[in-house]
Image (cartoon, coloured by chain):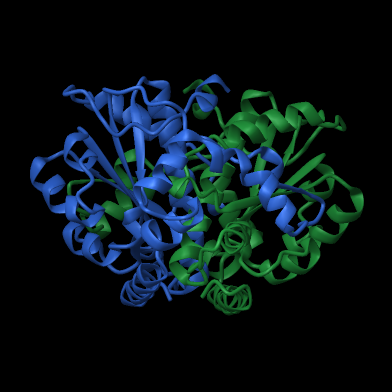
Chain colours: A green, B blue
């Protein structure tokens, strides 16, 4: 619990490599996670070389942790291995569809989060890169992902060279619903977002971006409709190209 | 690491309730997990009542743990709360698209896996129900999920009343790829699946199902093409109906 409760994303890493045996322990523990029907329909591509970090960096909008982290892990939904197995065993796979993609994506993320916990238990720090979904087409080319394989998320991993403050979270009662979903009224919204909106760092964030509200920083700057729609188009094309839609 | 390495899914629970304070601690720890841009675009619906377990059971193909577990948690991708916040703060949300759905689904699963670890740290057992994606349309009706909200996975939670053996996992080298993806040859497939195929429980499984190979149990019985395609259609319709595609 202590480990979970003190989690923060780490974006600055020491210039210390992650021992191969330690990495294997972390990945082994990660792969003990629950998965669908014990099919394990995911793969993890390990990037340690400067050459491949260099190639991946633009896919993650050149966030510096990609090049600075000793290890970069790309978690992929992967029905390719399972399909190959089926074909080699006189079985006809029927996994080139959206449900199978989503199932494999769930498996990949469960494994990723287990890897995070294992890494933190070993004194490492991690950061998720949500950009993986935005540039899946380019990552597929760089990592040579065959049909049936789609990158879902990326983790950077290394020994922390910073101790950032924990970021805020919404009150638990904003996230949970008892028995059925209770939709939010404007009064609820005020109640649940009040603390977040009044944090000094968030007020500063609004001012720096010349916006009226924190929500506008998200809609107008960080996660815009135009970008979301463009990335959606690419991602749907990726699913078709990888034969998962 | 010990906790991760000894994980097994628990399907039989003691007739002991989960204290509300313990559940809140677990959910609080779960929600400390990484999430996209600290938007926390997920919600958790808590089911404790017999009436709602009864309603949800058929959505999970009447697997007995739904009714027997003291707590059932449905993790949902949720842009509704965020959209409501944006609208209340003079910001125009642009999150009714596939990229935003996938982002929110990732957040929901990361939180779910963190909740699993927290629950296991408190001595509870968990089981994921992959059926959530198959019957999302029905779960939306039962839990009254508004537009912008899609159920992604479900956990049953309770004190273990069984200690099942750990299920096998593929060797780590079957799952990881160094620098780029190395596609599988028939020799690799034999190498990585050999142990799994020769486990007594899997040989028994093949015999019970009157199949030639373990792969056929998956393709012909457990996860058939016809079912996957039917569920894919429902899930894509759900995304459209919930305005996430």
Image location (x, y in percent) of residue A81: 63, 57
Q: Is residue A94 left or right of residue A120?
A: left
**Residue A8 occupies quadrant:** top right
- B166 or B6: which is nearer to us? B166
Relative to B144, is B166 above or below? above
Left or right for B151, reference A11: left
x, y (%) of residue A62? 79, 58
- Residue at 35 percent of width and 46 percent of height: B208
Q: Residue at x 82, y 52 (%)?
A: B179
- Residue located at (58% from left, 57% from top): A82
Q: Is residue A220 left or right of residue B191?
A: left
Closer-to-camera residue (A171/A230): A230
Q: Position of residue A93 (x, y in %)?
A: 51, 66
Observer-nearest of A80 and A123: A80
Q: Is A25 left or right of A70, judged from the image as shown?
A: left
Q: Residue at x 67, y 49 (%)?
A: B190
Q: Residue furthest right?
A: A51
Question: Where B58 falls versus B163 (above or below)?
Answer: below
Quadrant of the rendered structure where residue B198 is?
top right
Q: Nearer the viewer, residue A8 or A242?
A: A242
Count up the numbered dots.
0
């Amino acid at each position: 619990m202590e480990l979970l409760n003190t989690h923060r994303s780490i974006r600055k890493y020491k210039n210390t490599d992650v021992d191969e045996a330690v990495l294997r322990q972390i990945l082994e523990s990660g792969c003990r996670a629950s998965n669908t029907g014990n099919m394990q329909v995911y793969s993890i591509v390990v990037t340690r070389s400067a050459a491949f970090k260099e190639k991946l960096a633009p896919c993650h909008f050149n966030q510096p942790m990609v090049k600075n982290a000793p290890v970069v892990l790309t978690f992929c939904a992967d029905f390719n291995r399972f399909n190959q197995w089926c074909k080699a065993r006189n079985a006809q796979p029927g996994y080139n569809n959206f449900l199978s993609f989503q199932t494999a994506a769930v498996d990949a993320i469960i494994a990723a989060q287990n890897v995070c916990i294992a890494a933190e238990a070993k004194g490492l720090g991690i950061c998720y890169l949500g950009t993986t979904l935005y540039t899946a087409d380019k990552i597929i080319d760089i990592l040579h992902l065959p049909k049936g394989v789609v990158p879902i998320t990326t983790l950077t991993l290394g020994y922390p060279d910073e101790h950032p403050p924990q970021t805020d979270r919404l009150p638990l009662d904003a996230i949970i619903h008892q028995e059925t979903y209770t939709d939010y009224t404007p009064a609820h919204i005020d109640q649940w977002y009040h603390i977040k909106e009044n944090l000094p760092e968030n007020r500063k964030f609004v001012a720096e971006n010349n916006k009226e509200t924190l929500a506008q920083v998200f809609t107008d700057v960080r996660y815009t409709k135009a970008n979301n729609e463009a990335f959606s188009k690419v991602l749907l094309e990726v699913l078709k190209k990888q034969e998962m839609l």
